[in-house]
Image (cartoon, rainbow, N blue to C red):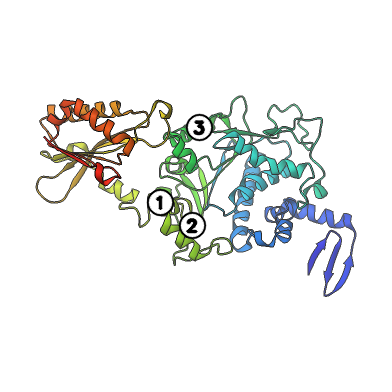
Amino acid sequence: MVWSQRGLVRNFGRCMTWNLDAERDLWADICYNSFWWFLRIGFGAEFYMRANPTEVWLVPRLHKPICDWLQDKVLEWEANRASNARTRMKIALIIPRAFGKTVIGTKALSMWGHLRNPNIATYIGSEVYTKAAEFLSPIKTIYESKDPYAWFPWLYGVWYSPERTWMSAKIVHAARKSISKGEPSFSTWGVESGITGAHPDWGAFDDPLSEEKIRESGNWINAVNQSFASLRPAFRTDSFFLLALTRYRDNDVVGSFIPIEGVRSWTGMPSPDSRFTPRVDGEWDVYFLQALDGGGASIYPEVWTTSELKKYETTRPVEFAAQMMNEPGSGEHMPLTSEQIAEMWIDKESVPTGLSITVHCDTAFKTTKRLGKGDESVVQVWGHDPRGNGEVYFLEGYSSNTWRIEDFTDELVKICQRYKKAGKRVREGVMRRLREAGFKPCLTSLRKTQNLFRLLKKLQMQGPYSDRGARTEA
């Protein structure tokens, strides 16, 4: 039995009709009590997919457990509030890209929360506020009764009112009864703008990171983490907060905050990191998925076939490990996992004496216009055990995306001077990734800095151009 329009169903070739008011009341009740059905009918995902059969993305096998889990967290939060418990509900939806997290968690769930309590204030955040406003846009469209697939207006009325705030980045909908409330029904924020002068009831922070932003600003991950830390005092102590994202780096919001604040419960696929083991004082409820199951098959072949995922993994392994497996810092492309690094850490006092010192540099010199943007120049110091056992120790490292050629060579000389004063002459220096435009200026700067050649036994300069290599023996 399949419905084709409201009030009409075709059953075994016969048309049957019934009272539209009764149907509306039935679906209004169903969608109010079931987030899964709200997403399909009230939000309109079911009818959109029927009208666009090549864009079928909502799969009961995969997505209904997510929706049921989200519903359980909303109901628990509502119960806590009803009992006046000052308890935050913090949930993280960590699933691969193109799995529907934004539509399900940021858009549809936020609307369902307002259906159940029209007086709450919801703030949607992302890497920039304009992107957050894009997440708000389809919600506004449905409230305005302009979405041809969503049954929301038919079930609950039009929530747009020309007499109330209705802007691209914030709105006050017609269903709100608490007119004196300072915060709008929906508002937005970005990483750099933050939230000021408001204390929302509900928050959704959706993908604050992107590869474009990371490449554009070498300090973007730190900026995101600082912005995220500022959200705790901004949101009410009994607020509902959803973190919906795909991972990018091991030191992203998930890797930096959830291990410290702790996991309360873990649902979905097993955690790949012992730092996320649930504990009694944990704050976060996490739903976690990876694109491939334990046998290497796609869990979402309707959108990502196994062969397509394997090609993705082969061509972009680092990106695949982070964005499809939600496990940055792992995979066949990684010589060490973050857990292995933790196991190999030793105290400074335990480092052997008499190490043979080498300095390794990766360059990304900046012009005046590019200061503070893009990749960083890096200087790392390593110590090699002279006993021939193959052990190598990472001693220290420095990086900056503001170094010009002169700044870089000055820093390199300072580091080598420190080791010479400590009686440890640097055995060799290696400079990599020297581009053609910066090769000759760098070599000229190094030659002017005569101290460097008295501090190094050997200096190798390596670029992508085979005829530009240089080796200098002290």
Q: Is residue 428 visible?
A: no
Question: Looking at the image, which is closer to me, 473 or 145?
Answer: 473
Q: Is residue 156 visible?
A: yes
The type of residue carrying mark 1 is Val
* Nearest to N terminus: mark 1 or mark 2: 2
* Nearest to N terminus: mark 2 or mark 3: 3
The type of residue carrying mark 3 is Ser
Residue 56 x/y as whole percent? 65, 60
Residue at x 40% of width, y 45% of height = 250
Residue neighbourhood size for the residue with mark 3, other residues' Cα within 10 Å, grouped as few (<14), some (14–19), many (≥20): many
Label 3 belongs to which residue? 227
Disc 2 and disc 3: Cα gap in Å? 27 Å
**406 on left or right of 306:** left
Instruction: Return the mark for residue 289.
Output: none
Image quadrant of residue 164? top right
Would you say the residues marked 1 and 2 are in contact, meaning their CB atoms lie under 8 Å apart?
A: no
Q: Nearer the viewer, mark 1 or mark 3?
A: 1
Residue neighbourhood size for the residue with mark 2, other residues' Cα within 10 Å, grouped as few (<14), some (14–19), many (≥20): many
Q: Secondary structure at mark 3?
A: helix
Would you say the residues marked 2 and 3 are in contact, meaning their CB atoms lie under 8 Å apart?
A: no
Q: Does 232 sit above or below residue 464?
A: above
* Nearest to N terminus: mark 1 or mark 3: 3
Q: Secondary structure at mark 1?
A: helix
Label 1 belongs to which residue? 318
